[in-house]
Image (tube, grey):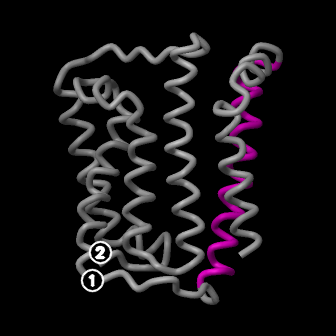
Amino acid sequence: MLVLILGIVVFLGIHSVRIVAPRWRLAKIAAWGENAWKGLYSLVSLLGLGLIIWGWILARPYSPFIYEPPVWMKHITLLLMLFSFISLMISNFKPGKLKPILKHPMLLAVKIWALAHVLANGDLASLILFLSFLAWAVADRIAIKRQERAGITQTIIVPGPVSNDVVAIIAGVVLYILFVWKLHAWLIGVSPI
């Protein structure tokens, strides 16, 4: 469990620099250049992700169950994950009408993903992983709002055509179908159905 927790700390730690030290982050980007900052950020993120995966593999077989979710909860999880994938694709595609409404669709996707997995998994390793990501996403959204009010950062998303929303939604549905069909079992080792 220690490797999993270390991975979460490393991964969410680098992703939290914007939350806890936004001015320091901006100063480092200015001093090092954006590419150098992104390179360091990516390396630390990959290290954290690798530790999370390794820690998950080590912890999962020995993780005690805190609760056993009812079967119907898995159906709610499947529905929530559809919205998570759509929100994820909205964040990665050009803005349509939805991206300005959602403001931070990537954070919304993470919150939905984490909540859905807390509902479907009652073992300690899962709860540590998914509750950590859920708490981080909520804290990040609150920090962004505070930084916008303080003038440190500003989120401006110019709405685009609805066709961009349609493409993002279709991409989200396709990715969702692929994950339910085979990818989740192949990547995670657990079938979502």
Q: Position of residue 92 (x, y in %)?
A: 40, 35
Q: Position of residue 136 (x, y in %)?
A: 57, 47
Q: Is residue 71 left or right of residue 61?
A: left
Q: Secondary structure at mark 1?
A: helix
- Classed neighbour count for the residue bearing mark 1: other residues with Cα under 10 Å, few (<14), some (14–19), many (≥20): few
Alpha carbons under labels 2 and 1: distance apart: 6 Å
Magenta segment: does it hold 56? yes
What residue is rendered at 23% in x and 42% in y? Answer: 169
Q: Which mark is residue 190?
A: none
Question: Which span of residues is magenta-colored?
Answer: 32-60
Q: Position of residue 175 (x, y in %)?
A: 31, 55
Q: Residue furthest top?
A: 151
Which residue is identified by label 2? 74
Which residue is identified by label 1? 71
What residue type is disc 1 on? Answer: Val
Q: Residue furthest right?
A: 31
Q: Is residue 99 left or right of residue 166?
A: right
